[in-house]
Image (spheres, rainbow, N blue to C red):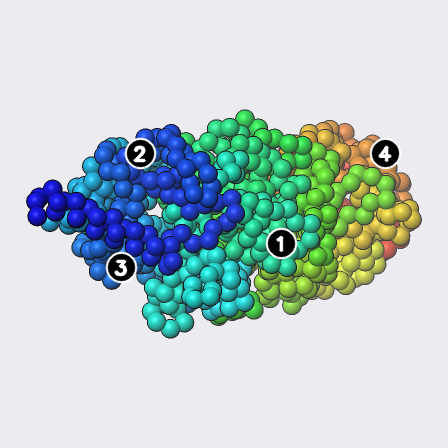
């Protein structure tokens, strides 16, 4: 037989083998049924690495005409398609389906840095993380960038020997290795490298044990046609691979669970589908909670929801997934970078707004652009969760999406104000939810299977600052659960639907902010709004009504409220804003020695928050404990002066006990005070549809009614149009919405107090409820004292809550709050610690309920003494 005959016979055998191989793949692996608009057609994908010309046409047997796409790397001459991955003969030992690549552990040694996080429950189920296996090894033989794309084991029946990893058996253009796209450390490359810490975990066992521990995954037992190992008669759409240890952990997620490397989308309007077996984007709009996942091609649910059900309705009607809420569309530049179809709305991008399965190096939890890198696109860097949110929650110019009325509020600007929450403290980022956090002292041990703490974003107390105050931080997901927030002023509307989760903008603020109307008939409360739904926090418990006593403990509040409408604070989930605030602003997050004026254990004041001794204070260097201050003992919630409970639970002097009781701003509970409505601005002077009588003292408030960016209005705490609610940042110290210093009071237009209390009433108009035998007490003092009155002359300088009624200081009875013995008298004006700031008031005795204040109650007991003390007060 001649040499040419031998070549012809060899070629015939190769063709015969290839034909049998294609039939084998058709039956076993390759040309499996695909979604209606997708076809198994590798020629029309970037996995066509042959020398076919970019843009050249061909005819597909079922889909009709096709076009070879533009590719950054391809063969210079080789025309075979399948050879880059498969061979009918001489395949990698033990590797199926007939792989034609060098694989880790089969010709060379490769070790990968694996994805990990403190909320990766698969690690708890398996016991340890495992190196890539199964189909993932084949994918990584190109996509880790260490083996030349053209390096195959067998070509035309010949196996090159030796076959190093860095040279090509098949010559290619565009470099021998996988191109780096926008940069090897960006999220816009498919040269993944050997560091997979920023890539979706693979070789993780997916079973009911994982579902039980995680709490937001679909059970493969209940959903066998959706996710599972394929077998005769059962072809789950998302296929697991038996690459794990034989037993319950054998079925694992690999690259081919989500990707089919042979398919392409035939509907160009749907955009690049990234070889996904199911929809890359959310296509279906839901009006009520769906019964099951909809896998329909181009009309169903996004592929992520095939495994991550995210509590169904909680995600689908969240502000990030609701079609009538998340209706902003991506700008052209962001669209191109993300390979989205033109004008893609946020609700369709769904999970991909915030996550990318192959994201920027350095990001945690697959967060898109989630690092502190300053390049665009981001290249490496340290974890920075807020940068994910800032893609949309920023200025109109900087946002990746178009601006619509009532859309994503600009949060980034507030976090760049002079005073702000410590969102950028620590490198790497301190914020880190932990699904095994131990909070057994507070009714929760996350290490136990079934507690499902990861989905609630629980952090350990130590990570909040306990025993290490440098860990104190603020991050977006400390206060908001992005999978559960809804655009509704009522955060607990019951079963979620499309209808009850699309409140419109109110007072220029997002429809997800709490209901706050400066209108007649409105009764304000402290029940959570939609933006706080599903977060976690704590409820303090108390053993004493004394202002000086710390809480005895805390109960953790967490979880998805589901269909519940219950709003009482005893519910297991968060129902109040203060519960979220107190997990950091109380001794839940730090050790409190309860020593004043400063002590030595509470967190220090300072940048990026407010500096020590600001606003006229001295000896004010540490935070106060807000759980202690805001306590609202039920026995003290009575009309002013109607009980004699004293400033320390009855342990003070006779004068401080008689007709005296605690006072507080009604953050945790109502005050029960029924003084005159004229001292208030709406809504605080309102009392429902029945008029004002009998309704004062029942309203409650938010922490963020006082804390947030500066409000220009002098008669309202509602944010300026376009500004968000929330304590993100402010131009004012202590993140306040107005001024609160030694000039606050008469003559100061931006005084915070006068955004709720009537400035005209307090500066001489009368009707404040401060009744004296000579008329309204504020009017009397305004008329008779040449110096303009300031709030801190008579009232405590940190007015969260206080030991005396009316938030009144008493320089005849200074005690532990200033580091002194109870009943200590001090000279005036008195400035010390957080609570006293140029204080003048001396109370000899408190009048009973209904009785008027007289000269004998105050200072030296005579008008001359009072005038002498206060005439030139500053």
Spatial CA span between label 3 and label 1: 42 Å
**First in sequence: mark 3 vs mark 1:** 3
Determine which of the numbered discs, if any, sits on residue 52 in the image. 2
Residue at numbered disc 1 = 314
In this picture, residue 765 sits left or right of residue 493: right
Callout 3–callout 1 Cβ contact below 8 Å: no
**First in sequence: mark 2 vs mark 3:** 2
In this picture, residue 192 sits left or right of residue 719: left
Spatial CA span between label 1 and label 4: 50 Å
Instruction: Give the crowd class for mark 2: few <14, some 14-19, many >=20 residues within 10 Å.
Output: many
Q: Is residue 689 visible?
A: yes
Q: Position of residue 729 (x, y in %)?
A: 57, 37
Residue at numbered disc 4 = 765
Determine which of the numbered discs, if any, sits on residue 373 in the image. none
Q: Is residue 578 visible?
A: no
Nearer the observer: mark 2 or 3; the answer is: 2
Q: Position of residue 815 (x, y in %)?
A: 63, 55
Nearer the observer: mark 2 or 1; the answer is: 2
Spatial CA span between label 3 and label 4: 88 Å
Nearer the observer: mark 3 or 4; the answer is: 3
Q: Position of residue 189 (x, y in %)?
A: 36, 39
Nearer the observer: mark 3 or 1; the answer is: 3
Q: Quadrant of residue 711?
A: top right
């Amino acid at each position: 037989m001649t040499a040419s005959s031998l070549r012809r016979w060899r070629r015939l055998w190769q063709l015969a083998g290839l034909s049998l191989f294609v039939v084998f793949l058709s039956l076993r692996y390759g040309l499996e049924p695909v979604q209606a608009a997708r076809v198994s057609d590798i020629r029309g994908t970037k996995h066509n690495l042959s020398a076919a010309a970019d843009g050249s046409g061909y005819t597909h047997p079922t889909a009709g005409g096709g076009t070879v796409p533009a590719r950054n790397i391809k063969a210079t001459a080789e025309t075979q398609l399948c050879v880059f991955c498969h061979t009918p003969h001489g395949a990698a030992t033990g590797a199926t389906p007939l792989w034609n690549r060098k694989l880790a552990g089969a010709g060379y040694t490769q070790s990968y840095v694996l994805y990990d996080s403190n909320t990766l429950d698969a690690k708890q189920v398996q016991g340890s993380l495992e190196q890539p296996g199964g189909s993932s090894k084949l994918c990584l033989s190109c996509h880790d960038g260490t083996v030349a794309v053209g390096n195959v084991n067998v070509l035309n029946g010949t196996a090159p020997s030796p076959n190093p990893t860095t040279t090509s058996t098949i010559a290619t253009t565009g470099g021998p290795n996988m191109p780096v796209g926008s940069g090897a450390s960006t999220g816009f490359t498919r040269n993944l490298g050997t560091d997979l810490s920023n890539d979706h975990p693979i070789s993780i066992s997916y079973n009911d044990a994982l579902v039980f521990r995680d709490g937001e995954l679909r059970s493969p037992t209940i959903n066998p046609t959706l996710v599972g190992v394929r077998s005769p008669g059962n072809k789950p759409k998302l296929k697991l691979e038996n690459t794990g240890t034989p037993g319950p952990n054998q079925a694992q997620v690999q690259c081919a669970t989500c990707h089919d490397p042979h398919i392409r989308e035939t509907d160009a309007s749907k955009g690049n589908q990234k070889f996904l077996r199911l929809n890359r984007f959310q296509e279906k709009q839901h009006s009520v909670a769906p019964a099951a996942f909809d896998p329909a091609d181009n009309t169903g649910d996004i592929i992520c929801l095939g495994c991550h059900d995210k509590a169904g309705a909680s995600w689908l009607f969240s502000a990030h997934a609701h079609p009538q809420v998340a209706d902003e569309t991506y700008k052209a530049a962001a669209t191109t970078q993300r390979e989205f179809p033109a004008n893609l709305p946020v609700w369709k991008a769904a999970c991909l707004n915030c996550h990318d399965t192959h994201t920027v190096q350095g990001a945690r939890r697959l967060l898109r652009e989630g690092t502190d890198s300053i390049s665009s696109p981001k290249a490496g860097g340290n974890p920075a969760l807020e940068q994910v949110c800032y893609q949309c929650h920023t200025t109109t110019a900087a946002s990746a999406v178009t601006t619509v009325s009532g859309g994503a509020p600009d949060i980034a600007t507030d976090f760049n104000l002079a005073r702000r929450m410590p969102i950028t403290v620590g490198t790497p980022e301190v914020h880190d939810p932990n699904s095994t956090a131990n909070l057994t002292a507070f009714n929760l041990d996350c290490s136990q299977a079934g507690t499902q703490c990861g989905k609630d974003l629980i952090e350990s107390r130590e990570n909040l600052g306990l025993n290490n105050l440098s860990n104190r931080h603020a991050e977006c997901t400390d206060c908001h659960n992005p999978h559960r927030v809804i655009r509704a002023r009522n955060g607990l509307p019951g079963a979620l639907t499309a209808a009850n989760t699309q409140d419109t903008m109110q007072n220029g603020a997002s429809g997800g902010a709490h209901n706050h109307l400066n209108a007649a008939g409105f009764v304000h409360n402290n029940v959570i709004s939609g933006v706080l739904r599903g977060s976690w926090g704590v409820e303090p418990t108390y053993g004493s009504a004394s202002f000086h006593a710390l809480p005895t403990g805390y109960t953790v509040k967490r979880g998805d409220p589901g269909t519940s409408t219950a709003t009482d604070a005893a519910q297991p989930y968060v129902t109040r804003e203060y519960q979220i605030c107190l997990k950091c602003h109380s001794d839940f997050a730090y050790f409190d020695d309860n020593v004043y004026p400063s002590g030595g254990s509470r967190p220090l004041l300072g940048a990026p928050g407010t500096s020590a001794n600001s606003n006229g204070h001295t000896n004010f260097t540490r935070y106060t404990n807000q759980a202690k201050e805001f306590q609202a003992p039920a026995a003290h919630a009575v009309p002013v002066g109607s009980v004699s409970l004293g400033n320390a639970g009855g342990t003070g002097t006779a004068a401080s006990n008689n007709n005296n009781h605690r006072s507080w701003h009604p953050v945790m509970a109502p005050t029960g005070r029924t003084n005159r409505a004229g001292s208030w601005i709406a809504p605080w002077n309102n009392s429902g549809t029945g008029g004002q009588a009998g309704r004062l003292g029942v309203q409650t408030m938010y922490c963020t009614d006082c804390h947030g960016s500066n409000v220009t209005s002098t008669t309202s705490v509602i944010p300026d149009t376009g500004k968000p609610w929330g304590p993100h940042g402010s131009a004012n110290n202590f993140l306040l919405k107005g001024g609160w210093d030694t000039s606050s009071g008469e003559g100061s237009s931006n005084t915070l107090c006068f955004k709720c209390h009537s400035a005209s009433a307090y500066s001489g108009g009368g009707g404040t409820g401060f009744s004296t035998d000579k008329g309204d007490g504020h009017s009397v003092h305004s008329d008779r004292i040449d110096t303009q009155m300031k709030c801190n002359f008579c009232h405590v300088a940190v007015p969260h809550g206080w030991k005396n009624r009316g938030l009144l200081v008493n320089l005849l009875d200074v005690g532990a709050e200033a580091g002194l013995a109870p009943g200590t008298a001090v000279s005036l004006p008195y400035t010390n610690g957080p609570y006293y700031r140029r204080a003048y008031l001396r109370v000899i005795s408190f009048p009973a309920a209904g009785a008027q204040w007289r000269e004998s109650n105050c200072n030296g007991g005579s008008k001359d003494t009072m005038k002498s003390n206060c005439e030139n007060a500053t």
